[in-house]
């Protein structure tokens, strides 16, 4: 199912639930209101009979006492105020529906029954139960309501005491009430179905407009997937959720484009940097292959060159691997003693550069970091300082409060190079004749940024280059 169809179905479903709840509530309220109105009419009719029984009371009492003049079940007690009290109740009392009156003695026997509907032969009277008998005997006070079925017709009955020993039952058929409720049910049903249909149509219309940004985003994603064109961008939309989604998509494309450009540049630079040592290495190996043309001294010199070139190549490959990790998140950050890392790096530098003197001052400092990468960054700073130091020169290393400074006594950094020393593969004019890949300081900057730190290169007032690497201290919540 498409998103458009799901939105329309959801809207229709929500409206259907709302319509169902409202319809049930409306039907229940209407049913209760109509039935309450019937009960009020029955109460008014019963109150009128009790308040003004006239000769009826006397005739009923005579018959209750057993002074029956005949076996007739139906009695004509005459009329009062132009209408029969024991006959069909006035039409106006029940909104056009006829009512019935029946009186019952304490034994539960009906005394009189009247009405304007045909009573079945096997059911001549309104039903009498124990509650009606208790009303007649005075054992129960108040009013008693009951809804019964009389030959397929639903009848509402009100029972209350008429005179001592006699209960009065006033009944009214609920045909009109049921007809009204049936019409209401049909109206609510038809209206509900129409409302759901309209909601579904409006849902489709709304969905048509709502998913346009999604369709644009989908088209852009498909375009990028097919063409690999990371420069493609989505037009800015309204500042809503879909607009923010489009902006996030553009940001993602920018990041991917930047990453792809960096990858291509890295591949191009790596190819260029690898080509030189490999060409030189191949040349030396080809010369070594001509055994007869070389003296032992030349051969030994070439072997030494090959070994040195292999070391340089190995260093270059290591630098390339570290440079390729630029976009990887720094993981496994653990509390570490930076002063210990620096001391170990200085010891390695002394072994690798025995002609250089390394002076170290390091105060204890704890940070969170990845020890291997931090150690590599510190080592690169020391190797860079040793490379630019004069023979038998000195390198001054200081660690104070997370600020590591490395100063050499070489020629310093040229003004035109100072802004580019941390760029990948950047090598100044003076550095091109020296071994190195041009990646060492870029890796230092990469490690510093990954640990929330900074690195700065400048010239020392007393001569030489001064590089400052700063790391944040470990936080209290870590």
Image (cartoon, rainbow, N blue to C red):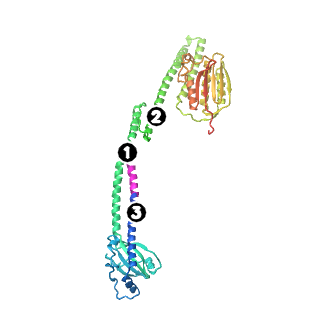
> Magenta residues?
1-21
Task: Say which label, 3 or 1, has the lower sequence index.
Answer: 3
> Is label 3 or label 1 in front?
3
Check if residue 422 falls in the magenta segment: no
Q: Which mark is residue 251?
A: 2
Quadrant position of residue 379: top right
Which SS class for mark 1? helix
Residue 286 percent coordinates (x, y): 53, 15
Q: Magenta-highlighted stretch: main secondary structure?
A: helix
Residue 456 in sight here = yes
Q: Which residue is mark 1?
A: 207
Q: Foreground residue, 6 or 119?
A: 119
Residue 416 point in image, percent of width and height: 54, 18
Quadrant occupied by the C terminus: top right
Residue 2 visible in the shown view: no
Specify the quadrant of the image occupied by residue 445.
Answer: top right
Image disc number at residue 29: 3
């Amino acid at each position: 199912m498409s998103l458009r169809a799901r939105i329309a179905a959801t809207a229709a479903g929500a409206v259907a639930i709302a319509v169902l709840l409202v319809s049930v509530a409306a039907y229940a309220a209407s049913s209760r209101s109509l039935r309450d109105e019937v009960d009020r009419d029955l109460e008014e009719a019963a109150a009128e009979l009790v308040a003004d029984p006239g000769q009826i009371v006397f005739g009923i009492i005579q018959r209750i006492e057993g002074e029956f003049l005949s076996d007739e079940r139906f009695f004509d007690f005459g009329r009062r105020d132009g209408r029969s009290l024991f006959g069909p109740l006035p039409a106006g009392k029940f909104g056009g529906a006829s009512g019935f009156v029946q009186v019952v003695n304490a034994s539960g026997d009906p005394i009189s029954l009247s009405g304007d509907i045909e009573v079945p032969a096997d059911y001549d009277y309104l039903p009498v139960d124990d509650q009606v008998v208790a009303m007649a005997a005075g054992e129960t006070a108040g009013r008693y309501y009951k809804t019964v079925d009389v030959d397929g017709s639903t009848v509402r009955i009100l029972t209350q005491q008429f005179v001592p020993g006699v209960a009065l039952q006033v009944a009214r058929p609920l045909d009109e009430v049921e007809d009204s409720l049936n019409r209401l049910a049909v109206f609510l049903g038809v209206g509900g179905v129409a409302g759901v249909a309209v909601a579904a149509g409006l849902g489709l219309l709304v969905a048509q407009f709502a998913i346009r940004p999604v369709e644009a985003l989908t088209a852009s994603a498909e375009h990028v997937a097919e063409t690999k064109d990371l420069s493609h961008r989505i037009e800015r939309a309204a500042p809503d959720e879909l607009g923010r989604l489009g902006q996030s998509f553009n940001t993602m494309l920018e990041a991917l484009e930047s990453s792809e450009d960096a990858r291509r540049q890295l591949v191009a630079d790596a190819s260029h940097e690898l080509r030189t040592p490999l060409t030189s290495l191949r040349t030396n190996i080809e010369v070594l292959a001509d055994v007869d043309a070389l003296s032992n001294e030349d051969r030994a010199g070439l072997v030494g060159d090959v070994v040195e070139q292999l070391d340089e190549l190995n260093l270059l490959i290591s630098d390339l691997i570290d440079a390729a990790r630029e976009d990887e998140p720094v993981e496994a950050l653990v509390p570490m003693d930076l002063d210990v890392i620096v001391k170990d790096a200085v010891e390695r530098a002394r072994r690798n550069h025995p002609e250089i003197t390394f002076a170290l001052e390091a105060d204890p400092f704890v940070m969170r970091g990845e020890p291997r990468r931090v150690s590599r960054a510190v080592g690169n700073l020391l190797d860079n300082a040793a490379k630019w130091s004069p023979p038998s020169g000195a390198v001054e290393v200081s660690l104070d409060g997370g600020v590591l400074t490395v100063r050499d006594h070489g020629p310093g950094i040229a003004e035109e190079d100072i802004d580019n020393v941390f760029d990948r593969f950047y090598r100044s004019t003076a550095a091109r004749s020296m071994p190195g890949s041009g990646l060492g300081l870029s890796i230092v900057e990469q490690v510093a940024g990954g640990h929330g730190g900074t690195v700065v290169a400048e010239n020392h007032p007393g001569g030489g280059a001064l590089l400052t690497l700063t790391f944040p201290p470990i936080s209290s919540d870590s």
